[in-house]
Amino acid sequence: MTDQMHSPSTWTPKPDRPPPVALTGALGWMRENLFSSWLNAFLTVASIYLLYSVIPPLVDWAFLSAVWEGASRDDCLEASGACWPIIAVRWKQLIYGFYPEVEYWRPILAFGLLIIALYFGLYDKAPGRKYGLWYVCIFPFVAYILLYGGVGGLEYVESARWGGLLLTLALGVTGIAFSIPFGIVLALGRRSELPVISMLCTIFIEFIRGVPLITLLFFGNVMLPLFLPEGMNIDNYLRVAVVVCFFASAYMAEVIRGGLQAIPTGQYEAAAALGLGYWRMMAFIILPQALRVSIPGIVNTSIGLYKDTTLVSLVALFDLFGMGRAINADAKWAALEIEIYTFIAMIFFISCFAMSRYSLWLEQRLARGEQR
Amino acid sequence: MGLLGVLLFFVVTNTIHNLEARNIATGFWFLSQPAGFEIQLTLIPYSAESTHGRVFVVGLLNTLFISVIGCVLATILGFFLGVLRLSGNWLLSNIIYWYVEFTRNVPLLLQIIFWYTIFLKLPHIRDSMEFGGTIYLNNRGVFAPAPILDEAFDFVLLALALAIAAVWILRRWSRKRQEATGQTFPVGLVGLAILVLLPVVVFYAAGSPMEWQHPARTRFSLRGGLQISPEFMAMLLALTLYTAAFISEIVRAGILSVHKGQREAAAALGLRPSWTMKLIVVPQAMRVIIPPLASQYMNLTKNSSLGFAIGFGELMAVFGGISLNQTGQAIECMAIVMVTYLIISLAISLFMNWYNAHVKLIER
């Protein structure tokens, strides 16, 4: 090899010259991504101006000029920035509502159990997932017993004292946990060949999807008491939870129906040829595939439902947002709505963003399986 | 089925019993009773002496009004954001990405109340913020110049209608000619010229039959002009920004769904980039975009019921809220409100089905 290269008769190429400085490194990247044309350069300049006019005042308000410690509103009067002490003073209400303070360990424990349930429910490579899924199924009941109490020496805490993030999570998790099985039933019912069942399911789904959640919540609040026998009174939380569950089920049913439609007819025919009846065919062949396809949609619907729980503040429940509005009414800390809403918005943003990232990650993984 | 019947019987007997116990008479007689309250925004004549039936119409019109304006604005903004997100400008597409993620992941109700709070925190009407001496911003809303129309303005509207008809005829003629001879005609440019010039010419020929009435500062207040309430502004802003974030994602997905090979094939056939966009990419993208877009319109209409939270006078707030409380006719009021929303939703989904059938790929 070396001989050949030194022999005069063989042509050897010179080493490549390095690419022009303007096409590599940071400069090249900027040329390609920020200034590739006049229009692009204009957009870049406009974006920089936009960032310049939004970010510095925002940072100044939230951090630089903000007050972080204080005992009352008066400590913030001189500052031009945010008044964060209100969050420090009120965070217990924002998280637990009116839950008795000595019993705080119960919501915390329930939250810990929720994290474990999420781990087993969402991560399909979790060790021991087979048993984990059973745990996921009993988790809602355990959590409710823990939060309500009244058994095994636990003090009974009526739901009127729940509030804040605790209530938001309780409603959201209940809605999602209830809506998946009930949504499957509705979706199967809508595709059923029995006309009465299919019609009833279709009417239910379309009715709920056709009206705003707030009218349904009003319906539950104003009209359920009229429907029930005199003297029988279910509490406000339960009424709202029932409405939220039905609402979520209708949306979930449509997502799952989409998944069912994606299953080729051959799968049904193959299952029938194997001699499987309707229920076995659904349980072992169709649903596992259909649910797999619809997981991203289920997660997106769950995000929507979780956000929609804020509407319960309009029917006199103190969820995270309702609690924030109630705190505004405190004269000692008047006119700090923006700080409270920012804090609540950040909580919602972080949790929903995490869910949507999860959905995206899952979608990409499922797509990878399809590509093979 | 038997179970369902028993349940139904149970509910009905309980309801009748409860209604009797509370002295509530059922029926729709209350619709002709005077309502006795004022509504801020009314598109038709309304006063406190008007009936509850009138309240329903006012509320419904307000719901439709804010929904239509919201849908138009959200579509424009959403298309802009969706296209700009794909523009290849790293900085801009990141800004839009974070805007979309933030708006989508924060509850709409929170956003509505947030904007409402901001509007209420604006300066007092005495120290209104002024923009170019024509638009004023204060805690009572936005004051803008109001157009005062003369009778002769009808001619301008007539001219506009004529221009639209002319453009439609021109389009048909040019398409026919292109099919027959292959010659093209710049319909877009000429059509735009007709649409703009004809009404403008008629406007000046009729002696400028429109004047702007500017809001004028008095000692403590502003007088005249068009006043837009903070409730309306907050609703419109929140609904538009929220829905636009969803629409931008729909538009982006729609454009990305058109296969790269389609553009390459168009280029190979010698189509100009603008033609490729108009004839190849947009029609195929629209097929993907329209169905989810229609369901966003449906969502926006349903979400307008959140005006209830800040007292914007839409259907749910005035009829499902105030009328219900004043008359105590819970079942009737809620039934009417729900059926109305159902009809609106059904209308939108019927349109969507028609459109889907219309643009469906016809395979041989």
Image (cartoon, coloured by chain):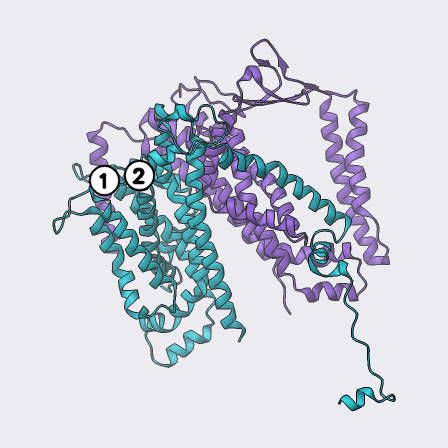
Percent position (x, y) of residue A259? Answer: 45, 64
Q: Nearer the viewer, residue A197 or A8?
A: A8
Q: Nearer the viewer, residue A11 or B176?
A: A11
Q: Nearer the viewer, residue A69 or B228?
A: A69
Q: CA distance from mark 1 to mark 2?
A: 9 Å
Percent position (x, y) of residue B149? Answer: 68, 21
Under circle 1, the secondary element is helix
Pointer 1 residue: A101
Q: For this view, does B111 lie left or right of residue B244? A: left
Q: Quadrant of residue A327?
A: top left
Instruction: Judge whether residue A217 can be spotted in this image.
Output: yes
Q: For this view, does B229 lie left or right of residue B185? A: left
- Chain coloured cyan: A
1 or 2: tag closer to the N-terminus: 2
Residue at 48 percent of width and 37 percent of height: B111
Asked if the residue at tag 2 contacts the one at tag 1, i.e. Cβ–Cβ closer than 8 Å, the answer is yes
Q: Amino acid at mark 1?
A: Glu
Q: Amino acid at mark 2?
A: Lys
Pointer 2 residue: A92
The answer to whether B355 is drawn above or below residue B338 in the figure is below
Under circle 2, the secondary element is helix
The crowd level at tag 2 (other Cα within 10 Å; few <14, some 14-19, many 20+) is some
Q: Please tell me the numbered disc located at residue B257.
A: none
